[in-house]
Amino acid sequence: MRISYNWLKEYIDIKIKPEELADNLTMAGLEVTSLAKVNNDVIFEMEITPNRPDWLSIIGIAKEVSAVLSKKINIKRSAYFVSAKDETGNKKTTVELYDEDLCPLYTARIIESVQIGPSPKWLRDRIESMGLRSINNVVDITNFCLFELGQPLHAFDFDKLSKNTLIVRRAKNEESIELIDGSSKTLTTDNLVIADNDKPIAVAGIMGAKNTEVTEKTKNILLESAYFNPLSVRRTSRKIGISSESSYRFERGVYIENVFRAQDRATLLIRDICGGKPSKLIIKGKSQAQKNTITITKKYIDDTLGIDIKKATIKKIFNSLECTVKEKKRSVFIVAIPAFRKDLSQPVDLIEEIVRIYGYHNIPDDIPKLVGGERKEFRRKCIEKIQNVAIGCGLNEAITYSMLEKNVAEKFNYTNVEIISIFNPLSKQNECMRTTVLPLLLKSVSYNLNRQNQSVALYEIGNIYYKLGDKFVEKTVLSIALAGFKSYSWDGNKKFNYYDLKGIVEAVLKQFSVNNITFEPSVHTIFMANSQADVLLEGKKIGVLGTFSKELIKSFDIDNEDVYIAEIDLESVFKYAVLDNKFKEIPKFPYVQRDISIIVDEKILANSIASFIKKRESKLIQKVEIIDIYKGEQIPANKQSLAFSITYQDTGKTLTDGEVSKLHESVKTSLMKEFSAQIR
């Protein structure tokens, strides 16, 4: 945005040079990108952020300069108020407002007997300094008020209005209009127009039509000042491909009270320069600006900024920004926000205002001393521990997208949760949020295998999303995928298997000292039968692991390769996780290992037998490991052979061979009785 230095000085007494003013404004957050000397003036090019539409005017910038330089702003209030004695015109019109959602406030005033001609030099200079050419005195006045106050205006030739009627309505479908710039546009019912009884005469908030343009023959004008819905103006501007100074401001939201101020300001200028006779103002819609107050404490300000700012300084800064401040209790401020500051909605916004006016350079740049507290939160520590284990197991980290196709999400929704769909997806690949990372990780496996990577070992720690009733749920999960050959195998010919995956899951969970981890057979359609399991912690399901079905991986262009995959709910793991390492004394007495091989029904879980052995004599049986599972020759149908290695140890003495043999025989007897086991 362009700002004239000379024009700015009409509202505030600036003693410093333009270069110094530019530096001060930039340091306060209003970036001046360049300065240019034009005739006897200096033009500032400024970068206006979208949240500060109040800066899109000379007076808005003057208010900012006032706060930054602690200078009083000088505005003649009488120049912005039309009194009853100024209303000397007699002509009347009918104004109808049909769409208050798109136009909450519309004002119109007829000004009679205007003399259209060239603008006085001071007005031409102001308009041209902003990069526009002078057209005629009425049009120049509307542009002058736009730049001065940030409120767009439009003047219609009143005598060209059909039946002296003005209507604010939606356009009819396929309705056309020829604009002032000579272009013709076809409109739809989504577009708001200003129309007379027969035709549209302006696209609301963007540009007027050729059919009611003010020319040298114009005698009477209708002056419009309104508030148009920012979203409506933005959509219409994009659709018809026109951006104007008016639409630029309406899109960002104008200050609703400026609707009246700009209307009066232009009316008085037209009266004085063009000799017009204004009539009474017509108002349609609601004009009340929404009031907002924010409560903030001095302690919160000091704690956030890390410095002690005096209360008097805080109040002075608020007042300079036109924020009315009252001290309710000791050091508790109630701050009334002016309606034109829509960007101020919470206490942290006020802190930003304080620090930028106070001066960032006044904030000490020394690093405060850290006193106590954890530098890393518990959750982050847990995730880092998982990453270390995963890398130690030979896995590579994958990072996938959080959205995917809806049909894929439905196919992989093994937990049967409610999927969150995107209302307006950018593409088919972004139709919904993922309820599992598995399809995206499988896509990564396919990508690697089809590019001759014969060993794929991936993991991802990411979030999944689903809906539970009226609530949206976001969870962190660990997903693991294995396919192809083991890169760490000495002969290079051993492929990953289901038990490699299970071992990695156990290695991860072991790091958190969680107990009672069990694996139970599951029935999920995305996995192969008899090659899948639910992971349980304290009896509650926290994850799943298995081998993807052949039909499923074939749809991902994977042939002749098994893909093993797991997914663990880390939120559940974190609840039980223990990160403090507890060390035990190294046993003083030796241990004894004995193996046992049994034949049992194939439906019996090896893990349930291992748990039974461990519980039977928990003081002396230190460890029970499954070392072999076999089905085939010499094993009856519907049976399986299980081999276990049992570690016996007494922490108080050395076990004799006889004691161990007695214990071992007791274990065999218990297994035969409990599981009808046959000792091999």
Image (cartoon, rainbow, N blue to C red):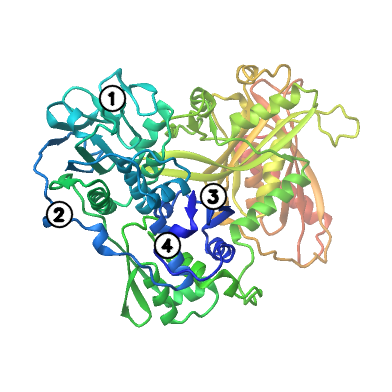
Amino acid type, mark 1:
Thr
Instruction: Give the SS element for disc 4.
Output: helix
Mark 3: which secondary structure? helix
Where is mark 4, residue-wise?
A: 62
The kind of residue on which mark 3 rests is Glu
Contact (Cβ within 8 Å) of mark 2 with mark 3: no
Above or below, 407 relative to 120: above
Q: Which element carries disc 2, helix, strand or loop?
A: helix
Crowding near the residue tagged with mark 1, few <14, some 14–19, many ≥20 C-alpha atoms within 10 Å: few
Q: Amino acid at mark 2?
A: Asp
Task: Identify residue type, mark 4.
Answer: Ala
Residue 601 at least partly seen: no
Q: Nearer the viewer, residue 160 or 20?
A: 160
Q: Around disc 4, counting alpha carbons within 10 Å, would you say few (fewer than 14), some (14 to 19), or many (20 or more)?
A: many
Image point (64%, 73%), residue name: 365
Quadrant placement of the C terminus = top right
Residue, disc 3: 571
Q: Which of the 4 image quadrants contains residue 549?
A: top right
Disc 2 crowd, CA 10 A, few/some/many (<14, 14-19, 20+): some
Q: Earlier in the sequence, mark 4 or mark 3?
A: 4
What residue would you read off at disc 2? Answer: 86
Does residue 467 sit above or below 444 in this rendering? Answer: below
Sequence-first tag of 2 and 1: 2
The Cα atoms of the two marked residues, 4 and 1, are separated by 40 Å
Mark 3 or mark 1: which is in front?
1
Rate crowding at label 3 as few (under 14), some (14 to 19) or many (20 or more) other CA atoms within 10 Å. some
Please say if the residues under marks 2 and 1 sit with CB atoms less than 8 Å apart.
no
Precedes in sequence: disc 3 or disc 1: 1
Q: CA distance from mark 2 to mark 1?
A: 39 Å
